[in-house]
Amino acid sequence: MIAAGPDTTSARRRVRIHRAWWVAAITFAALLAAASFRSSTGVLIEPLEAEFGWSRALTSGAITVNFILYGLTAPFAAALMERFGVRGVVVAALGLIAAGMGLTTLMTSGWQLYALWGLCVGLGTGALALVFGAIVANRWFVRHRGLMMGAFSAASATGQLVFLPVIANLTENVGWRQAALLVAALALLLIPFVLALLAESPAAVGLRPYGDPAAGEVSTDAPSHAMGGDKGDGAARTAIRVLREASHSATFWILMGTFFICGWSTNGLIQTHFIPAAHDHGMPPTTAAGLLAVIGAFDILGTLASGWLTDRVDSRKLLLAYYGLRGLSLLVVPAVLGPTVEPPLFFFIVFYGLDWVATVPPTVALCRQHFGLERSGILFGWVFGAHMVGAGVAASVAGLIRTSTGDYAAAWYAAGLLCVVAAFAILRIPRPPIPETAASVKTDQAAPEPGQITLS
């Protein structure tokens, strides 16, 4: 055996993990923490109604406020991140989530549920929406950008996978207050890790994005915000201006409309109402929560695969398939729900899990390709806002349908038909003016100059 010489040992010592991967890890964890609250609402609906005598319409209304604020906060949070920095916004959001969830254990009336679940946690989770992941992916990665966006999207599924069974068991065996405190504690525990690991941008620490063809280090005097935040404008003004400029594009409105339907058919309907709907058919809530966790497990696979495909396949084709197949699957839900988990229901769970948020990576890619890298984070914030408004509307509509008819059948059929409409709408999006492939990273260098937005 030949001993390693000094040069070999030095070379090994110089091999370091790129800072982008540490930033990605803490971003994933923060998104996971935000997802833990959103996955808990379906479990907590019935215990809250039982303890306080609240109606399904009231609890669904609080979730609607949460979803809408969660979505509408996203573009402004993106602008705040551009102007004041990502780390400070993320820390503030985690603190707000912890405060909102912790204080729910002391509430005694319905308006407090709206204030805490709706306002407090809605704003906090909105600042940790997928636009946060989109900003990190765009700033820190050139190679594997689509794959990383898939990983960040999967964080929502992972939060559901990890926390939903725990929250369901805590709620059933100990109490819903302990479940709420678990979410609050997780948010607080993440804050020191965010402060230690979440750098603002590669340039801020003397690096280039991972996979940038221009190798080597850069000066830390370079601009810290790779996406071109406008220092002269307030965050709200920047977000509104980007919306006004994009509003002249039909592509923007198609992306907004289809993502509205995406939120309607996922967070608003399945995440909020699947557990009580399954309970209506005689299934124990813990079993239904376990099925949602299975959806989360398969969503990790589906979203990572979608991110990988987004780096290689026309995003429009992917969205056409995702929405069309999702719509057809929702139409069969009333026929497969029952007191036990039969093969048709399990097949739906697996299939729906693979498609849950697979729409995110290609939607982010289309925002970047049609409108340019510099404004894609804020633009996706508006698109994501439509997603959560759709979720909020669906949460209330499904709750009203259940209250007035006694079951959720009409809600499943309506969501399925809307997804089919979304699939056909995707056909109206033109070919991106900035096509991207795995073999070409030069398109990232061809992004518009700061302040410019390219409309299709």
Image (tube, helix red, strand yellow):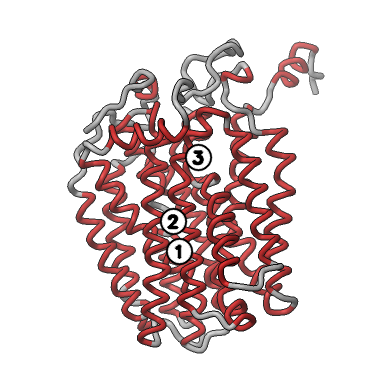
Residue 77 badge: 3
User: Does 39 appear above or below 153?
Assistant: below
Gap in angstroms between the C-alphas marked 2 and 1: 6 Å
Quick check: 332 left or right of 347? Answer: left
Judge whether residue 148 can be spotted in this image: no
Q: Secondary structure at mark 1?
A: helix
Quick check: 179 left or right of 73? Answer: right
| Residue topped by disc 2 | 68
| Residue topped by disc 1 | 64
Question: Which of the 4 image quadrants contains residue 236?
Answer: top left
Gap in angstroms between the C-alphas marked 2 and 3: 14 Å
Q: Secondary structure at mark 2?
A: helix
Q: Are marks 2 and 1 in contact (CB under 8 Å)?
A: yes
> Which of the two residues, 228 or 233, is positioned nearer the viewer here?
233
User: Does 450 appear above or below 427?
Assistant: above
Say what amino acid the circle numbered 2 marks.
Ile
Quick check: 196 left or right of 271? Answer: right
Residue at position x 41%, y 36% in the image? 378
Q: Position of residue 375 (x, y in %)?
A: 38, 30
